[in-house]
Image: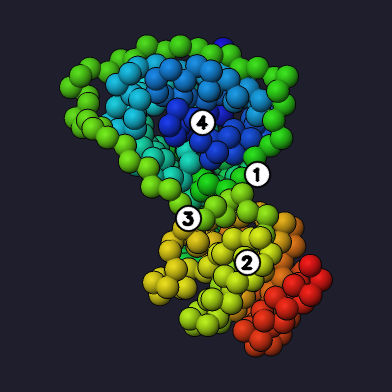
C-alpha cells in the first residue's frame, strides 16, 4: 500500500490498452520517487483493465489504485476529474503527473482547480532539487522545466507551498525504461463514488482515425523545413524518406503553411522523436524544433546558411542547396544499394 507523499501518475488507456505516454511517465516517476525515497503509485480509471495495468509494475510502479466501473469505459471530463481528486485527497501524494494529451490537458486543470494547487503544463524535464525563497529553503522540491516565451527561454517553475505539485508532460519527451517483467505491481481496488448525476455527457460512439504516419516508432525521419517547402523540395524530401525506408517529418512553419498534415510535425508543439537517423532538410533549427529531435542518435543537417543553429546539434552538416544535395543523396544511396 502507498505511503503519504508518494509520486503518482494518472494512467491513460486507449481502447483498454495503457497509453505509451503513461509508461513514459511511470518510467520518469520512478526516478523522481527514488530520489525522494518514496513509492511510485498510479491511478487507473476504466473498465476491466486489471490485466492491462499489470504492465505498470514492469516499469517500476509499486501500487495501482484502480477504479473499475462500466460507466468509466470512455473518458469524460467531470467523472474522471472527480475520481482523481478523491484518490489524491485519500492518499496525499506530493507529486502528480499527467500526459499532456487531449485527455490530460482536459482533466489536469480540473483536478488542480478543485485541489487549489499549481499545475505546470507541457514540461520537457522534471527534477528534484532545492529552491530558495528569501530566507526560506525548500528541499526535495519538484522543479518543473519547460520552454517559455515562444521557446526563447527555458523556465523552471516550482510550487513548494502548493501540494501536490502537478505537471503535464508531452508524449515522447520522457524516455520509456526497459521493462523488467520480473517486477509486479500491487492492485488496490477503489470504490467508485460517482452518482449518475455526475455523468453529464454520454459517449455514443468512438471513431478512431488511422494516422498515415508513425513518427514515434520510425528509425529514420527525413524532415522538411521552410528551406524545402516548395513543391519540388517537399517531393524530394518524401522521395529520400521512401528511398531510406523512413518517415517524413516537418517543422511547424511548414505544417502551418498547410502543405503537410500536422501528424508530421516535430518539435515543441508537435512530436518528440528519437530515431536512429534524423535528416533535417532546410530547417534552421530554432529551439522549438530542437526540443523535438535533439535526442536522435544521428542528425544530418542540410542548409544553405552555414550559421543555421541546426548545425550546433548536428553530427554531420552539409552546407548547400537543399534540393541539389537531396538529389545527390538519393543517387548515391541507390548506387550502393
Alpha-carbon neighbours of circle 3 within 10 Å: few (<14), some, or many (≥20)? few
Q: Give the number of the disc on residue 231.
A: none
Question: Which of pointers 1 and 2 lies earlier in the amino acid sequence?
Answer: 1
Residue 43 visible in image: yes
* Quarter where residue 84 is shown: top left
Q: What whole-number distance in Å separates the C-alpha atoms at marks 1 and 2? A: 25 Å
* Quarter where residue 13 is shown: top left
Q: What whole-number distance in Å separates the C-alpha atoms at marks 3 and 1? A: 24 Å
Q: What whole-number distance in Å separates the C-alpha atoms at marks 3 and 2? A: 14 Å
Alpha-carbon neighbours of circle 1 within 10 Å: few (<14), some, or many (≥20)? some
Between residues 37 and 133, which one lies in front from this camera angle? Answer: 37
Q: What whole-number distance in Å separates the C-alpha atoms at marks 2 and 4? A: 30 Å
Q: Secondary structure at mark 3?
A: loop
Foreground mark, 3 or 1, reads 3
Pointer 3: what residue? Answer: 212
Question: Which of pointers 4 and 1 lies earlier in the amino acid sequence?
Answer: 4
At 61% from the left edge and 45% from the top edge, which residue is drawn? 174
Pointer 2: what residue? Answer: 241
Q: Position of residue 140 (x, y in %)?
A: 62, 36
Q: What whole-number distance in Å separates the C-alpha atoms at marks 3 and 4? A: 22 Å
Residue 130 visible in image: no
Pointer 1: what residue? Answer: 175
Q: Give the number of the disc on residue 18.
A: 4
Foreground mark, 2 or 4, reads 2
324 left or right of 204 in image: right
Query: Which color scheme does this rendered protein use?
Result: rainbow
Amino acid at each position: 500500500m502507498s505511503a503519504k507523499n508518494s509520486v503518482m501518475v494518472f494512467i491513460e488507456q486507449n481502447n483498454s490498452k495503457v497509453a505509451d505516454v503513461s509508461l513514459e511517465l511511470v518510467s520518469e516517476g520512478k526516478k523522481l520517487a527514488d530520489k525522494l525515497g518514496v513509492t511510485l503509485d498510479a491511478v487507473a480509471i476504466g473498465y476491466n483493465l486489471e490485466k492491462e495495468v499489470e504492465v505498470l509494475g514492469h516499469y517500476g510502479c509499486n501500487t495501482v489504485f484502480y477504479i473499475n466501473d462500466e460507466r468509466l469505459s470512455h473518458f469524460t471530463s467531470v467523472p474522471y476529474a472527480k475520481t482523481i481528486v478523491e484518490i489524491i485527497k485519500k492518499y496525499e501524494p506530493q507529486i502528480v503527473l499527467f500526459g499532456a494529451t487531449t485527455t490530460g490537458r482536459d482533466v489536469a486543470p480540473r483536478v488542480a482547480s478543485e485541489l487549489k494547487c499549481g499545475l505546470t503544463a507541457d514540461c520537457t524535464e522534471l527534477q528534484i532539487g532545492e529552491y530558495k525563497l528569501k530566507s526560506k529553503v525548500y528541499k526535495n522540491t519538484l522543479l518543473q522545466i519547460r520552454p517559455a516565451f515562444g521557446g526563447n527561454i527555458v523556465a523552471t517553475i516550482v510550487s513548494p507551498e502548493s501540494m501536490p505539485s502537478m505537471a503535464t508532460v508531452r508524449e515522447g519527451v520522457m524516455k520509456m525504461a526497459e521493462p523488467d517483467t520480473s517486477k509486479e505491481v500491487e492492485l488496490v481496488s477503489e470504490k467508485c463514488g460517482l452518482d449518475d448525476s455526475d455523468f453529464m455527457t454520454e459517449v455514443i460512439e468512438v471513431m478512431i482515425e488511422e494516422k498515415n504516419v508513425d513518427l514515434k516508432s520510425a528509425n529514420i525521419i527525413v524532415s522538411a523545413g521552410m528551406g524545402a517547402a516548395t513543391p519540388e523540395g517537399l517531393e524530394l524530401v518524401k522521395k529520400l524518406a521512401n528511398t531510406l525506408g523512413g518517415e517524413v517529418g516537418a517543422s511547424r512553419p511548414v505544417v502551418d503553411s498547410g502543405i503537410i498534415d500536422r501528424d508530421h510535425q516535430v518539435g515543441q508543439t508537435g512530436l518528440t522523436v528519437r530515431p536512429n537517423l534524423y535528416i533535417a532538410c532546410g530547417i534552421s533549427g530554432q529551439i522549438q524544433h530542437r526540443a523535438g529531435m535533439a535526442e536522435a542518435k544521428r542528425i544530418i543537417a542540410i542548409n544553405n546558411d552555414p550559421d543555421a543553429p541546426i548545425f550546433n546539434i548536428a553530427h554531420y552538416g552539409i552546407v548547400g542547396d537543399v534540393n541539389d544535395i537531396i538529389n545527390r543523396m538519393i543517387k548515391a544511396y541507390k548506387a550502393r544499394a
